[in-house]
Amino acid sequence: MSGRPGRARWGTIVAMQTDVLDAPPRVIPPLVSALRADLLAAPYTIAATEDLYGPLAVAALRRENPVPARRVLRGRTDPLAVLLSVLTLGAAVPRPLIDAALPSLGAEGALELGILVPASDGEGGADADAADGESLLRAAIDLSPYSAQDDAGEIDWWIASDLSEIATGRPLRGEHVLGVGGASLTLARITPRDAVGSVLDLGCGGGIQALHAARHARRVVATDLSERALAVAAFNAALNAEEGAAPIELRHGSLLEPVAGETFDLVVSNPPFVITPRDTALAHDRTAGAEGSWTYRDGGRAGDTLLAELLGALPSHLAPGGRAVMLGNWEVPDGEATDAHPRAWLDPALEDGVDAWVILRETEDPAQYAETWGRDGGVTDRDPRWQDMQEAWLDDFAARGVEGLGFGYLLLRRPERGTAPRPGILRSEEATGTGSGTLSSHLTASLAMIDVLAGIDDDALAASRPVRAADVVERRHLTPGAWDPTLIELVQGAGLARAVRADQLLAATVGALDGTLTLGQTVSAVCALTDTDPDQARETLFPQIRELVTTGMLSL
């Protein structure tokens, strides 16, 4: 069909669907192959989609406003427009348009796969006009294009999930399988992509992390408590199968139960960390499931105890040299440090010789948190349940004296076999910035450097030849007309874009570290120029140098 706008016999109208989720898609290999061929031919990709929509509609969709996108698609009958309308925006469309948009699969194949279902009477609204005798079809799932890049090259996939609020016009159901959201993208960006033997995707949802892992691992296991999520993950794995990628083994169960006794080289997890009160106004509402929660995000425990349970058990599943990369929320009790909870949870890991790194990325007060996650479930301040839901959240936090909620990254690493046994090292910091470059490489290198520095005493450090990273610059703040700076900062352009306060001694030392001299020789030279006692300088400088090496601002 022509890609030009023309008169269509259907409207881009949200399908008014029932309270019951449609069955998840099925894996029927010949039909999945036909679907893949049609999506490639459309072409159903991020680049083509953004080109069709234009910047205004793309920006509006990111704000969950579908109106500009629907205006762009109105009247178009080309395959890309039809697929976007039905698979992402909730339109009910005549069967002949589906046959034309999916010529290899056809409408019958789409129905058999379970990605489309017949629209019932009234679905699609008055503007969904079909010719006499034409049946209307609507999406049973969301199927969206996805693009990324990793060490293996460019990625163009299609990710199935349950239909969003944009498509359904109603709050999410308790068993909703989430698509690729902000948390999923964050986790994918911070996960190391070097070749490994085995990967565990814990709480896999629709399987996006497992798909990424299959490109750089020989074996991938993905687990989830939701059988619906596993069915969607199986469909995504089949649709996006790549030559040379590892097979993905899907297992049903809670947290680490499905992998009891097994170890992995890499564990990646976006666990259900959202802290939701167990006794809410939605406790018996079908909108939020039997327990008033959403399986994809809520852990089903009081407070943040699910994350505590997970971090307590995880170290025993790390092989020598194994790493874990997780996202998490934790409570900040009144009067306590922002990292008090994760520090306490990680004590068993440290006793087991595992190094840990807590990176706090942002904090919210209890009211902000309740608003964020209430809206995430599709309940807004216009909903009659909003007031009771917010009250329940605030009461729950007040009962435990919670003054804030932290969100961040939790990284673990077990040292390689053969290194001298030692207690684990805990690093904790608040880092809200993001610089240039690949964040996963930066975090991986820093986590490994914690182990390296643990084996280097100060004499060995003095004999090393650290080199200042190319992205590190010095920033000086001066009062107008003054010669001496009131503040000196060493600023990192890559990684987490840290800014480290420095005195003249540290700034001069870092400025001279180009690999020509050893650290000891450099410090001696700087002390001679500044009339500083070398022993005192070494005592002050060496812990600072270790910190700069750990964060990648210096390299050994």
Image: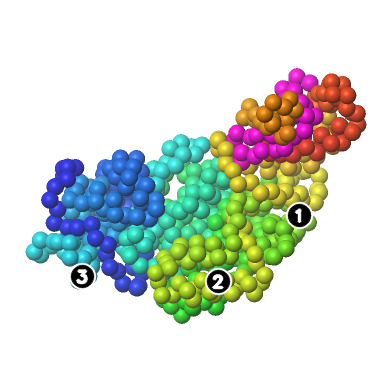
For the residue marked with disc 2, what is the amino acid? Trp
Q: Which residue is mark 3?
A: 122
Q: Assess whether residue 35 is covered by the magenta stretch.
A: no
Query: What residue is shown at x 60% (from left), y 34% (from top)?
Result: 493
In the foreground, 198 or 128 = 128
Of tags 1 and 2, the one toward the viewer is 2
Split into 4 quadrants, where in the image is the C terminus? top right
Q: Earlier in the sequence, mark 3 or mark 1?
A: 3
For the residue marked with disc 1, what is the amino acid? Leu
Query: What residue is shown at x 63% (from left), y 66% (from top)?
Result: 304
Q: Can the viewer see residue 477 in this picture?
A: yes
State whether residue 234 is above or below residue 154. below
Of tags 3 and 1, the one toward the viewer is 3
Q: Which residue is mark 1?
A: 350
- The residue segment tinted magenta is 489-517
Q: Which residue is mark 2?
A: 393
For the residue marked with disc 3, what is the amino acid? Gly
Q: Which color scheme did the rendering employ for the protein? A: rainbow
Query: What residue is shown at x 46% (from left), y 80% (from top)?
Result: 284
Left or right, 383 with reference to 502? left
Verify CB contact (< 8 Å) between mark 3 and mark 1.
Answer: no
Label 2 Cα neighbours within 10 Å, binned few <14 / some 14-19 / many ≥20 = many
Q: Position of residue 527 (x, y in %)?
A: 86, 25
Label 1 Cα neighbours within 10 Å, binned few <14 / some 14-19 / many ≥20 = many
